[in-house]
Structures are given as structure tokens and as C-alpha cells.
Amino acid sequence: MSDNIPPFEIQVEIIKRIPDVKTLIQFRSVSKLWKSLIDSPEFIADYQTRHRNHRLLVRCVGFSRKYELIVDDDVFPQHKIPVTVPMFVKSLLPRHDISMTTSQGLVCCYNTHENQSDSGTKNVLLWNPAIRKSVLSLCLMFFYDFRYKTNIGFGVSPHTNDPMLVKINNNNIDMSISLFMSCIPWHVEVFTLSTGVWRSLRTNLPRKSIDLSWHHVVIDEFIYWIGIDWCDIIDKRVLSMIISFDMRSEEFTEIFLPDYLARFYYDCLNISKLRESLVVLETNDQVEKLEHVVWIMDHGVPNSFTKLFTIKAPDASIKRVFGFWNSGEPIVERILMYGPINDRFVNSVYDPCSQRFYDIPIPEKGCLDSVSSYSETLLLLDHRDNGKLSKHTVTDTLLTFGAGRQGVEI
């Protein structure tokens, strides 16, 4: 019987080709040899590069907060898979402002400030929904008052597979603050899960007068924010830009926007991820019905942006753009100009070629709050689960949207 068992080298090649993380977790129970293989950093890194199971992690807010994984393809829902939600996430009330960022299959969650006096120590959760593991041992000192504020960046370096947090304490400058405030330097600290410690960065920091938006995007080894130089505003100019952080070199870089975009305040600009490219979303509020213009950074070349398309509807305002399918179609929230108040908000997918909208369902009553790109990973497999997961599996569903739609390549 044992003569029919292939050599271990062939077994390894077969295991490497298993596309489903849940199956790999079950394979760890076959033998100590298989468990040692799958748990090894080399196997986890190889799996990370081999398999890209495109998902969208969505959050809906109603009477309760609900998280779902959506298969990023053109097949309509056919099956549901239970997802275990960490107790830390479940314990946060819907009124809390929760930041949620995804990178290389990990989700970073923390409770941001609720008001301008909400400073103090907060927990940060690193969560892998695919293997039902989370790490909750990272404490951050947040500041938010008339002088300072704290920004957080999260990413997983594709070169080291090491989760990284970047904490930035900088000026909370507005137009009523004198230039004296812009003399206060940034204070930047970096945390990596492999070391478990915070390190201060002293060099290559952005200029003191630059302020960052709360939202950030992770693409490859870079973390991006929209920024603005308040010194220019005091000089009666607007200079919005993108600030990037290289997780490999740990350096910040200013990426200048086209002159047309740079003149907008950053509350009219947002950034998102289209496949592995950075896009800037411009809100056009100079028209009767709100529109959004999508700009893409050309082939990852800083300071070079091209206009892709405009998202507009004759019968609705485009309230916001949540994110993009892997096919390139944006997921948007429309405000219809007719119908009862409760029925005016519609979540749709926009096809830039046909300029048509395809409405998508929300699994339960509530509002779609955020959409993040996600792919399954084995990261955190070799870490102890201390995220205090709930004892009961929360039956959030793994759904698929998009029947009857044709994907459009951009």
C-alpha cells in the first residue's frame, strides 16, 4: 500500500497547488510532516505569491455591524461559508468609528477617535479571516486635540511578509492656526510584528506643514495618503499631494498631483486601489448631481496620472465610491432624485463602457459602509491567537455578486 504513496517532494508540489486556505488548514492534521511543511515561513511565503483568491471585504452598518467576504468574479451567489469574527470587532458599537485596512490577506482594525477630546491608549487588531486567527496586543497612544492628531498606516511588505504599523503624530493645523504651529515636527514610529517593538524614525520625514487625511491605501510595498501643505493655504494657494511610505526603505516621498487636481482640498479627493494601481477619486460638486472622476497613476510612475472615466448618472448623485472589482468596475452609492427617503440610497456597480449601473443587493437592512480588496493568506498561522474570538461562529456569508454583468478591462 505504501508503494502507492508518492515521494514527499511530489506531495509538497501537490499541496502547494491547493487554492483553498481552509483545505490547507485541514491538511495540517494529516501528519506532523505536513503540519511542519504548511506552518513553515517558506511555505507561507510561497503560497502568498502563488495564489491570489480575489475577494472583497465589505462592512454594512445598520442596527448591528456586519462583515462579509464577496467573491470577486462574475458568478452569482451559490454558497455561503461561515466567517468567525473576533470579539474585539464584535464588541465595538456601530456608533464607533472603526478604521479597517486590508493588506496581503490581513485586516487591521482599530477604533479611531469619537470626538476631539478622545485621546488615549487604543488597541489594534490584526485579523486573518481565512484561518480565524487574530492578534490583539498592540497598544497605540492616540492624540486628538487642537494641536495634534494621530494617523495610522498599515501594510504587509510583500518582500518580508511582515505586518507593519506606522504611527504618525503630526500637527492638527487649520487655517486659524499661525505658521508657528507648522514648526512642530512630525513624530513617526514603526512597529513590525516580527520584532514586537516600536521604533522611532528620525530622518526622511515629510515637511512639518504637511497634513494627512485619515484614509490610506496599501499597494505592493507602499502605503499612500492624501496630503495637503497648509503653508500654501495660508499663502492663499492649495497644494494637495500624495504622501507615500516605502515599507522596505522606511522613507516618505511626496508625489505631486497634476495641477488641476492639486488645487482641490483633500476633502474633495480620495484614493483607492484598482487591481495593483493607485487611483485618485475627484468629487465634482460643481454640477447639479455629484459626479466622481477616476484618475490612475500611470504604471506606478509617481507624478504621472491619467483620467480614466467619469462616474455620473442622469437621475442620481454619486454619493461615494467604495472601491473597485478586479475587473475595474467601481462600486458606488447613488442618491436617487425620486422615491421615498429610505429607498433613495442604492448600491450599484458602474460599467464605464456602457455607462450603465447594475444594482447589487445588501444581505440585510443597513448601509454599505466600506469595501476593501482582500485575498486569502496563511499569515499569522505561526502566531498564537490572542484576539479573544467569540465562542460562537458568526454566520456572516461568503457571497458572490455580479450575475448578468460583463466585466470590463481597463
Image (spheres, rainbow, N blue to C red):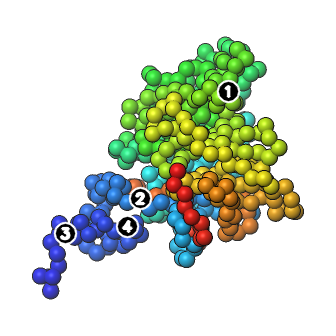
Vertical side of 195 occupied by 45: above or below: below
The image quarter in which residue 379 lies = bottom left
* Mark earlier in primary sequence (1, 2): 2
Q: Amino acid at mark 3?
A: Ile
| Label 3: few (<14), some (14–19) or many (≥20) C-alpha neighbours in 10 Å | few
- Viewed as shown, does residue 115 lie left or right of 53? right
Q: How far is disc 3 from disc 2 in space, using C-alphas?
A: 22 Å
Q: Which circle's residue, 1 or 4, is located before the other in the chain?
A: 4
Residue kind at label 2, given as amino acid type: Arg
Q: Nearer the viewer, residue 117 or 354?
A: 354
Query: Residue 29's x, y, as percent?
Result: 32, 73
C-alpha gap between disc 1 and disc 2 = 37 Å
- Identified by mark 4, the residue type is Pro
The mark nearer the N terminus, 2 or 4, is 4
Q: Which residue is mark 3?
A: 10
Q: Position of residue 88 (x, y in %)?
A: 58, 56
Residue at the far bottom in the pictured view = 1
Task: Give the alpha-carbon distance from disc 1 to disc 4, as whole Å.
Answer: 46 Å
| Residue identified by numbered label 1 | 263
Residue marked by disc 4: 19
